[in-house]
Image: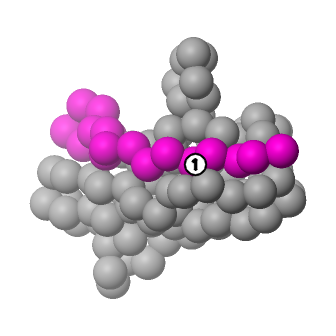
């Protein structure tokens, strides 16, 4: 099972960015998928989840600004980030649980300048 995040970059505060995660080796449509982030010098934190049925949940800090979605045909997970703030600066990771173990993708860095 492999997860690979991409799409990070530098964006000004108030701007938008979409990060993506490609899954392989997994029957993607069956699994809840999650986004986490790790700000500089801080611990990793959960950001958003989407279940196999498409139900979404978000941490309060991003509600109304971020949208998680999935394309089960392409086995892709997305995080659309709007109205970005400097405090959204972090390495963003996609994650799922497979056979009882956490699977993490290589993260992608999002930097929001003020």
Q: Mark 1: give few (<14), some (14-19) or many (20+) Cα within 10 Å.
A: many
Q: Nearer the viewer, residue 78 or 10?
A: 10
Residue carrying label 1:
110
* Residue 47 locus on image (x, y percent): 63, 41
Q: In the picture shown, does residue 48 fall above or below 44?
A: below
Q: How many labels does the image show?
A: 1
User: Residue at coordinates 54% horizontally, 30% vertically from top-left?
Assistant: 38
Side of 98 where 18 appears, left or right? right
* Residue 76 locus on image (x, y percent): 38, 71
The quarter of the picture where residue 69 lies is bottom right
* Residue 52 locus on image (x, y percent): 45, 63
Side of 79 where 13 appears, left or right? right
Q: What element carries label 1?
A: strand
Q: Does the segment drawn in magenta span residue 102?
A: yes
Q: Does the segment drawn in magenta span residue 27?
A: no
Side of 56 where 91 appears, left or right? left
Magenta span main SS? strand
Q: What stretch is highlighted in magenta?
A: 97-114
User: Residue at coordinates 85% horizontally, 59% vertically from top-left?
Assistant: 14
* Residue 99 locus on image (x, y percent): 20, 39
Q: In which quarter of the image is the C terminus?
A: top right
Q: Answer whether residue 41 is visible to the viewer in this image.
A: yes
User: Residue at coordinates 16% horizontally, 51% vertically from top-left?
Assistant: 1
Q: Nearer the viewer, residue 85 or 10?
A: 10
């Amino acid at each position: 099972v492999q997860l690979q995040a991409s799409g990070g970059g530098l964006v000004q505060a108030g701007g938008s960015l979409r990060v993506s995660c490609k899954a392989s080796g997994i029957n993607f449509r069956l699994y809840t998928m999650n986004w986490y982030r790790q700000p500089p010098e801080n611990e990793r934190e959960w950001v958003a989840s989407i279940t196999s049925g498409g139900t979404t949940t978000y941490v309060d800090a991003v509600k109304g600004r971020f949208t998680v979605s999935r394309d089960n045909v392409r086995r892709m997970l997305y995080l659309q980030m709007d109205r970005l703030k400097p405090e959204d600066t972090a390495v963003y990771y996609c994650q799922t649980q497979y056979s009882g173990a956490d699977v993490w993708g290589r993260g992608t860095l999002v930097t929001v300048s003020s």
